[in-house]
Image (cartoon, rainbow, N blue to C red):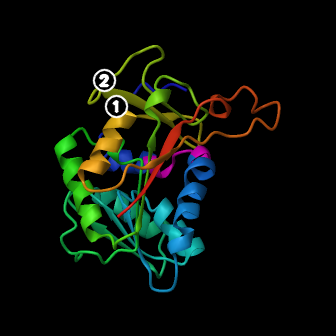
Amino acid sequence: MTADDDPLGWDTSAAAGAYRDRDMRLAERLIFPAVLERLSGSSGPGRLALDIGCGTGAVAARLAATGGWTVQGVDPSADMLDIARADRAHPRVSYRLFDGRSLDWLADGTVDAAVCCLVYCTDPDDHRLAGLTAEIRRVLRPGAPYVLADLNPAATGVVFSTLRHGEPGAVYRDGDAVATLLRLRDGSAMTGVTYHRSLDRYRALLTEAGFPSPTVELPTLPADGAAEETAAETRIAPYMILTTHA
């Protein structure tokens, strides 16, 4: 999986268009079911879930369709939101532009669950992420779940079937920029930039905002056939899923 283009900024129309066409097979098998399962005990009629950094709406639409949630999807990219509204409209999903930090239209303790998938890794600013995490904690009802899914920092340089973040053999420190390739459905790849953070740094962002230390899951695919036995995602987790509660 190679890409020759310069890295695309995540908030650009070019990135939104490429992201629309990304190969989502690994996320669909390793992230989406886990998010739905961790929120299943909290769902119900009229319950509000917040999808932070909703992008093109893949998670928001699933929450509404299979979890029964009313969903607010928020993202700092107007282009991503335009795609979400076009591709994943749902009567119980609303999409809203926000600045990546403030949730000031939501009152304290009014949200029943929050998810944030593959967002922290795209932001180089720890201060902004700390502010966002504190805002998520503020708007959640006591005991409400927060599920944060992101790239596994222990998997840099590993070539997975749909992505690679980092160069093989490279060592990254917290805050380092990491070239990231995402496979598109036509077999080509887009290049973006993510930012390395250790698992300890993720834990600190949560606990410093007032959340309990999260549980951590590193999901892999079963090696259930000859084609999959050599796939990296059967041996090491591309993503990590952190779950905590307000």
- Which residue is nearer to you in this view: 141 or 115? 141
Q: Earlier in the sequence, mark 2 or mark 1?
A: 2
Q: Amino acid at mark 2?
A: Arg
Q: Is residue 78 above or below residue 161?
A: below
In percent of width and height, residue 96 lies at 30, 69
Number of other residues with Cα within 10 Å of mark 1, as a class: few under 14, some 14 to 19, many 20 or more:
many
Number of other residues with Cα within 10 Å of mark 2, as a class: few under 14, some 14 to 19, many 20 or more:
few
Hey, which residue is sitting farthest front in the picture? 212
In percent of width and height, residue 170 lies at 41, 15
**Residue drawn at x 39%, y 36% as measured from the top left:** 199
- Which residue is nearer to you in this view: 73 or 39? 39
Tell me the distance, in whole angstroms, between the alpha carbons under discs 2 and 1. 6 Å
Task: Give the left or right position of residue 153, taking residue 43 as reference.
Answer: left
Q: Amino acid at mark 1?
A: His
In percent of width and height, residue 158 lies at 53, 24
In percent of width and height, residue 194 lies at 35, 35
Q: Which residue is mark 1?
A: 196
Q: Quadrant of the N terminus?
A: top right
Q: Is residue 173 above or below residue 137?
A: above
Res 12 seen here: no
Res 206 seen here: yes
Hey, which residue is sitting farthest bottom in the picture? 45
What number is the disc on residue 206?
none
Label 2 sits on a secondary structure element that is: loop
**Residue drawn at x 32%, y 70% as measured from the top left:** 140
Residue range corresponding to the magenta coloring: 19-26
What number is the disc on residue 173?
2
Magenta run includes residue 199: no
Task: Give the left or right position of residue 47, taking residue 137 as reference.
Answer: right
Disc 2, disc 1: CB below 8 Å? yes
Q: How many marks?
A: 2
Label 1 sits on a secondary structure element that is: loop
